[in-house]
Every structure is written in structure tokens, then in C-alpha cells.
Image (cartoon, rainbow, N blue to C red):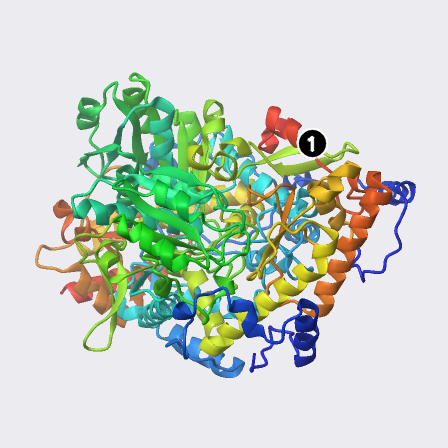
Amino acid sequence: MTQSNGTDAVVTQAEAMKQASSHQAPDKKLIFEMSREGRVAYSLPECDVPEEQLDSLIPSSYLRSEPAQLPEVYEVDVIRHYTELSRRNFGIDNGFYPLGSCTMKYNPKINEDTARFAGFAKIHPYQPESSIQGALEMMYILQNDLAALTGMDQVTLQPAAGAHGEWTGLMMIRAYHEARGETRTKVIVPDSSHGTNPASATAAGLDTVTIKSNEDGLVDLDALRAAVGPDTAALMLTNPSTLGLFEEHILEIADIVHEAGGLLYYDGANSNAIMGIARPGDMGFDVVHLNLHKTMSTPHGGGGPGAGPVGVKEKLVPYLPKPIVIKKSDGTFAFDYHRPDSIGRVKAFYGNFGILVRAYTYIRTYGPEGLKTVSECAVLNANYMMHRLAPYFELPFERVCKHEFVISGSPLKQYGVRTLDVAKRLLDFGFHPPTIYFPLNVEECMMIEPTETESKETLDAFIDTLIQIAQEAKEQPDLLLNAPYHTQVRRLNETQAARKPVLNCACNS
Amino acid sequence: MKQKHRYIPMTEQDQAEMLDVIGISSVDELFHDIPESVRYQGTLPMSEALNEAKLLKHMRSLSDQNADFDRYTSFLGAGIYDHHVPVVINHVISRSEFYTAYTPYQPEISQGELQAIFEFQSYICEITGMAVANASMYDGATALGEASSLAAQHTKRKQIIISKTVHPEAREIVHTTARGLGLEIVEIDMQNGVTDLAKLEAAVSADTAAVVIQSPNFLGCIEDVRAIEPIIHQHKGLLVMSTNPISLGLLESPGKLGADVVVGDAQPFGIHAALGGPTCGFFAVTESLMRKIPGRIVGQTVDIDGKRGFVLTLQAREQHIRREKATSNICSNQALLALCASVYLSTMGKEGLREVAGLNIQKSHYASKRLHEAQGLELAFSAPFFNEFVLKLPPHVSVEAINEKLIARGIIGGYDLGLHYDELKHHMLIAVTERRTKEEIDEFAALLEEVLA
């Protein structure tokens, strides 16, 4: 892949194919295919205790009848194999990654260093509290910092991811209603919501009611009024929404839901737009989750681990998962398990502590003023890109956006080109494509989130490339339909993968 | 935008040019859609910014207050273990092409991650003896919650029977999950450190979706899975088994023992303890449950040139397509930690995994004998164990107080079972991994004798 400077000459289909075929190389071997009997890559402590016959310690009927067939390789094989795999992968450190709703900002290196300090990485969750005071203090400060940032009264750090936070929040909302003797089973979500929202509702034993957005892409107040009632448990809202639009009637929305006796849940996926500018707690939300792997720069790790802390208003504090970290009157820190109304435990131990260390480190590189700058720059970058791209694509909502925006590739359909093809062509220029075909309520959409950590030169290069691709779509659509050409593999047969699943290498033999 | 910051490239010049393209005169105008009354005035009451040097010093001072495995000798397990972490692992997971990537939505530029997950799935299938494994779960405990949910969905039954020898925190999560889904949970007592088979048999019926066990169990004992398997299968329910994966170097694979769903935590495979997280749950099933499995799955396929490649597959189960009808709300996995586990298993290989399991068995059994014979302390159970066993302390002794004394002498003592089991007050669960030396074990025994005196 080549990083585009935005001035690449348009290549012809034939040239692109020729270049692509010259890229042919044998399949990358699986580690299992590199095995050679007798090789080792390990060094273990010796057995310095008197060795006993194995079946004298454990009955032979409990022992493995045949060893697991793991590969036999040496250390250089291990390092070369995984180094080669890493070269076949694309992260933020490789280039621009404007994946909407995912907040692919730079992952600071200091986060990785502090999380590896022995006092954070090599401690046991059941050690005496007196021997982990530094860890508890860090968690305590982070709980308070996140509560201040979101305008909530108390925070749990236990949930492992955003979806896990959603479920945790909904379980608390359910417990709150039940404690008041009310049966409320409906969770209202807009049609632009993340798929995890309804899936989390189901896991919490609640039913989903989806309402349509209005022509401005916002919550339709009349539809909301019609949907709420005595069975409303909560409205789940992402604000700014997945369309990148701020719900300007948020206070009316909150009133409608609260008057019906429901609560407001804030999906924090898009918090990077509003840090220090507006707080969910001040907008009327009762429960908030944050995605630390998005807003707080802890890496996405290729799909995880993340962390999804949840903040709540006072009335929901009794239902928080246990334990939470408290500061005792003598100034020491402790886990508080004495929470009789708690919904219980949602994750083993105390959450993804290693991710919390990274998030706390990040917060302290910026402080409150710096985090506000983060959001301002993220929003300015998004609006700049939206204005430059609007003439070449369709802009479904012509208004100011927040940290991300949605454009539609539907004008290219007349050339037989779809948004998927645009995304695949972007790969040839060294860019990760935006989120595509989400949210569901905009046809052929691309959701673009630049974040604050990208320079104007990078934004311009990406914009120029998208404009060039739109031109290619008009002049030589086949070029897009067969893209990419310069990647390790080309378009993959996903139908075959699903119809004849090969899910592990044993299936190859 | 007053401050300059090393992660933000925006200059005054950039800002002016961008505002000009947008056609506005100030950044503030971009926020006019936020009602004035909810605009935050002033500075948030949060921790202040520190420069890089000061921040490192601050984090170091917090870290130094914690008793870590480099400076202390740990005999604590109970779900998180102090195993040797091969040095190559940190080098591999520090490759930022891995750790700064998102979920591999664009397979053409994510073959590295996809292949790594495919190999992880292959490793999990190989050691568990199961047909299908997913790309990983948050941790072993939440994986058990998801397994219960799968069993209820698959059998269309509402009762989950779980042994009290399953990790107490995992049981708590199963309870929380069950409250969400309206399932009934029945807990089965133990007998000599393992599930009471008579009580289990009496409890299981045609209403039971699954029997949930853990082996080696929370008390370190190995369950008689061969005896448990027919009890649930004769009623056509599922056998869900949680396991410590490092024990599978020598213990019979759950697949061979007849398990339908196998879960566990891959923390022993090269993942640092980190106060209990992040770790990596694994989830494996029989072929017939393939389309019911939660989470991400990677499959092999070919590209348009016929080259082998990998993609996320069987996505019709998932939330972004099925929304409220999805099999689970999970949309992530623990990819980076699954990578730790894969690098660990690549490093250990066929011989190393057997050897490390053997070292755990030898050293823990030496420790149990040493403590029992030399100190006259009682072992609570006679059931076979892997690398953990339960020591019965004299009735006047508080495990918590003992552990405070031990840590003052550089030893992280065992787990206080009285916290979760009324019948096991004054009982300590002790873990001995391959990292413990004979000298450390002897010293621990001597110290324990001293503090008990």
C-alpha cells in the first residue's frame, strides 16, 4: 500500500490489474504449518522438588489420553511469524483511520508504559487491600474524574466494554423501577442507534421500541410522545447521535421521558464531541457509559480489551454493581461490598484495570482544559471535512455536525458503484475506510470521524483521494468494482466463509 | 484552543483556514446547537494536567505502593495465577499494528489480526477437544454467564443448575445474567471439595437447560466429569464446563469428557494478573451449537484470485444485524489478549504445555505434603487437585490476619475461603505454580508455622 499525497494519477483498470497480479505471493503459513518435530521455543523453571509418578498424584482416568497437537517451533519462528502477521495489519500508527463512532485517535505511548509498571501489571485482585493502596487510589480518582466529566454522582469501573456498560446500566434501571413497585419493560431507541442498544435491552429482559428519526436526523418528538407510557423503562440515546448531530431538543426529550416515569440512558460512544462543553448529567441523563477505548485513547487492541465505566445519578447509586472503591475516614482506600441493593457483579474482579491505568494516564496528560480542546479540535476537523466533501457526495443533513458526520454515496449508484466499492478503493491509497452502511437510516452511507489527533494535511490528503475516487467512479467504474489491488489479499468470498464454515485449522486436514 | 499539546497538530493557521472553508468565524459557532442552559461554564473539577516527566513520576509513585509479583512471592490463585510469562509475548503485543487496530472490519488490510484470531480459535479447539471456538470473550466469568444464556436459548428451558464449586464471582455473574433473562438458578452443594453427585442427580430434570461445573474447580479439586456427564445428558440438557486451560496440558480434554460448552479464562496463558483484568475468556462448543455461539468468529475463505484469506463470519447471529434478536450483545472480543494466549501456546508448543502443567502438579503436591506433614496442618479435601489445594487452619485463626502478617514478610498468602463459604471459615486456598521454587515453598511453610505459633 502507498500513502497517498492526493495527487496520484488515475490508473487504468488494466494497469491496476497488472500491478495487482505482480503482488501475488504464496499464502502466509499458519503457525501450525511451520511445526517441525523436536523444536522448542520455551524455557521453564526446573523441577526442584522431588518428582513423583504423575498417576500417583492424579488418577490416570483424569489424565489426557493424547497430547494437544500444538506446533513445535523455535523462538525465531515465533517472532518472525507474528511480526509478519503484524505487517499484514493496519492500525492507527500505520495511517488515517476515520472509522465513524469508533474514535480512532492516537493511542499515546506513555499509556502503554505506565500500564506495564510492575505495581499495576503484576498484582493480584485478592491481595490484602493494604498492599494495593496505589491501585485503589488510582481507581478512586478515576471514578471521580469520570463522574465530573459526565455530570454524574457515582461511577462503576467494572464493565469491560461499551455494550457491557449498556447492559449494566439497563439492569440498574430495571432494579430502580422494580424497587418502586413499577413494571416497566420497554426501552425506546431511535432508528439511528447502535445495534448493541436493543441487544443489551434483550439481555436485560427488556423489550425494544424503535422510533423513526425526523427529516433533520433527530429524535422525532411526536414519535417519542406517542411511544412513551407507563411501560417505558428508558430511552437510550447517543448524543451527538451516530449521524454526528446534537439533539438540540434534548431538554424537551428528557422532560417527555421523565414525565412518563422513564429514565434516560446516555450511550457514550460519541463523548469525544462534548468533553468540557456539555455534560450528559446536565442534559437530563440518569445513566451514562463511556468507552475508554474510544474517548480516553486506550487502544482498541484489534477488537479489545476496552472498558465501559458507567456513571449514574444519585437515585441509582444503590444499584451500582459491587464493589466500588471508597476512601475511608482514615484516608485509606477500600472496596465497598456492603451494597444490599446492588444489581450484583457484572465482571470478575474490578473491571479491566490495565485499561483504567491507561485512561487515567491519558486524562492526566490533558487535564480538564486540555480535554475541552480535544473536543473542539475533533469537531472542527469533522466540520471542515464535511464542508469540503459535501459537493461531491450527498449530504443528508445540512447542519453543523459534531465530531463525526455522515455522507451518502448514493450519487455514485448511477455508475453502478456502491459505497462498499469506494471503501475498498480507499484501501489502495493507504487509508482505512470510514464506517459504512451505518447508521441504517441513511442509504449508502459513510460515517467519517477524523478525531483531534489528525493534521490538516492528512485530512486534505484523504479528502482529495475521496474526490478522486468519486471521479474514477464516473469515468471507469470497473476500477472501483474490482478494488483493492494493492493489499495482501483482495476481496474475499464472505458467502463461502459463512456457508461452508472453516473455523479452525483442524478442518484443513 | 489555547493550549498546545503533543497529540494535537492544530495550529492557529490551520484553525483559521478551516474556519474559512466552513464559513464561520469562531469554533464556538460549531456548538450553537447545544442549548445554552446545558453548556458547561467554567473548568471541570478533574485531575489536572501533568507534563510527561511529572506524570511518569506520579504513576510510578502509585505503582510503587502496590506489592507486585516481582518483589513478593505469591501463593494466591483463586482464578488469577502468577505463571511465567515468556518475554516474547510483550514484544509481539507491543507491535502497534496489532494494538492500535480496530476490530478487523476491512479484511483486506486486517489479515494479520484475522489470522491470529483464526489460530487462537484453532488452539482453543485443540486443547479443549471441541469443534468450534469463538474469537474470545471479556473473561472466563462472563463467558460462563453467556454459556448459561446459550443453554437456555438452545434447550428452551429456564433452569440452570450450577455447582457451588464454581468460582463464586462467576456464579454471581451467572445470577446477574439470569435475572436479566428470567432464568432460575439452582446451586448444588459440595462433598469432599467436589460437586455432590447425589444432590446433583436429584436436582436435574427435564426442565434443566444445563449443568454448569468447573474443573479443576474453585477449590482446586478435579471434578469427576465422567460421572456428571450422563446425569445431564440423560435429560437432554447441556453440560457446560469451565476449566483452567493450563491444566489441559495433562488433564483430559473437556471434549473427550462429553462437555457441550467449554469456557474459561486464558489468563494463565501469558497474560499478566493486572488486578484481575483485562484477561481473555474463551468459549468453545460442539459442532451442533456453532450458530448459537456468542461473539466474533473468524473463518477461512479465498479471495477473488483464489488466495487463502480470513474474514469475520457467521455474523447473522450478531447485534449489528439482528439487533434485539441477536444471540448476545457482545460486539468486541479481547483480541490483544487472545494474541497473548496464542503467542504463549506457540512458545510452549506440544512439549512445553505438558511440561508446565507437570511442574504445577509436582510443585503444588510437594507444597501440600510439606505443609501437611511438616507443620501438622490439615488438608481439607482428599480429591485429586491440579495446582491449588485447601489448607484447614486452626479454628481460632483468621486467614485475613495471617495474610497481613505474611505480606509484611514478603509473601502474598492464599485465598480466604470463609469469604464465600460458611462451611470453609479458617480455610486457605493455596496456589503453587511453576514459578515457585522449593526454597520459596519451604520458606512459606516455615513462615506459616511461625505466624500460627
Viewer-closest of A50 and B151: B151
Q: Quadrant of residue A437?
A: top right
Q: Quadrant of residue B324?
A: top left
**Which residue sits at x=39%, y=26%?**
B257
- On the image, the x and y values in percent for residue A317 come to 24, 59
**Which residue sits at x=49%, y=72%?**
A371
In the rendered view, does B91 fall on the left or right side of A95? left
Q: Residue furthest front?
A: A222
Viewer-closest of A282 and B63: A282
- On the image, the x and y values in percent for residue B151 come to 35, 28
Name the residue type under label 1. Asn
Q: Kindly identify which residue carries mark 1.
A: A493
In the rendered view, does A373 fall on the left or right side of A386? left
Task: Indicate the quadrant containing the N terminus of chain B: top left, top right, bottom left or bottom right.
Answer: bottom right
Q: Quadrant of residue A473?
A: top right
* Chain designation of label 1: A
Q: Which type of secondary structure does the marked residue at label 1 adopt? A: loop
- Say above or below: B224 vs A218: above
Q: Residue furthest left?
A: B396
In the rendered view, does A6 fall on the left or right side of A120? right
In the rendered view, does B201 fall on the left or right side of B280? left
- On the image, the x and y values in percent for residue A270 come to 49, 58
- Say above or below: B81 vs A328: above
